Amino acid sequence: MSTHTEVQYQIDETGLPTPEQLAQWVNAALAERHEGGELCIRIVDKTESQHLNSTYRHKDKPTNVLSFPFEVPEGIPLDILGDLVICADVVAEEAAEQGKASKDHWAHMVIHGCLHLLGFDHINETEAEEMEALERQILAGLNIADPYR
């Protein structure tokens, strides 16, 4: 069973991943880790990304991906994972700076965000190593090179 992925484009979607590509990357990230469920991916500009990053992380700059896990109230049978907010301009800039194909970097950001929704993090070195190893494994399954090289 695949995850239902809603996609919202706050900006012109020309040249951006399609809802089908985004859903493919979501399902790759969640395979064997979470079955079914729902999540929303909102693709935004730098202004919205910076506002959300400032409001929720107290970092006054745009960022590549923000993850907002949904906390289901006890006793309510919902399977909502949460929301990902991805800044298209930051992802494009990072891909260019790092010499990566744009599509590959988008896949990495979606997978990275989905793992955050599942509770993975990279606050300390041990957690970072575990999360990065999982990202490498998922990306390799999509024939995408190690993003940390």
Image (spheres, helix red, strand yellow):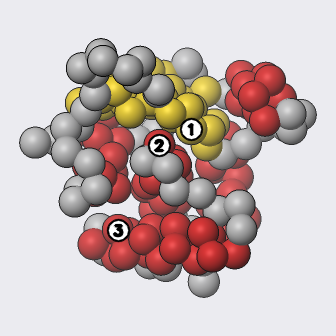
Q: Residue at x 49, y 49 (%)?
A: 119
Crowding near the residue tagged with mark 3, few <14, some 14–19, many ≥20 C-alpha atoms within 10 Å: many
Cα separation between marks 1 and 3: 18 Å
Q: Amino acid at mark 3?
A: Ile
* Left or right position of 125 against 55: left
Q: Confirm whether residue 115 shows in the render.
A: yes
Q: Which residue is denoted by mark 3 in the rendering?
A: 138
Crowding near the residue tagged with mark 2, few <14, some 14–19, many ≥20 C-alpha atoms within 10 Å: many
Mark 1 vs 3, N-terminal side: 1
Q: Quadrant of the C terminus?
A: bottom right
Q: Which mark is residue 111?
A: none
* Left or right position of 64 against 60: left
Q: Amino acid at mark 1?
A: Ser
Q: Nearer the viewer, residue 87 or 55?
A: 55
* Left or right position of 142 against 108: left
Cα separation between marks 1 and 2: 6 Å
Q: Which residue is denoted by mark 1 in the rendering?
A: 67
Q: Which residue is denoted by mark 2 in the rendering?
A: 117
Disc nearest the viewer among 2 and 3: 2
Q: Residue at x 47, y 26 (%)?
A: 71
Q: Secondary structure at mark 1?
A: strand
Q: Amino acid at mark 2?
A: Leu
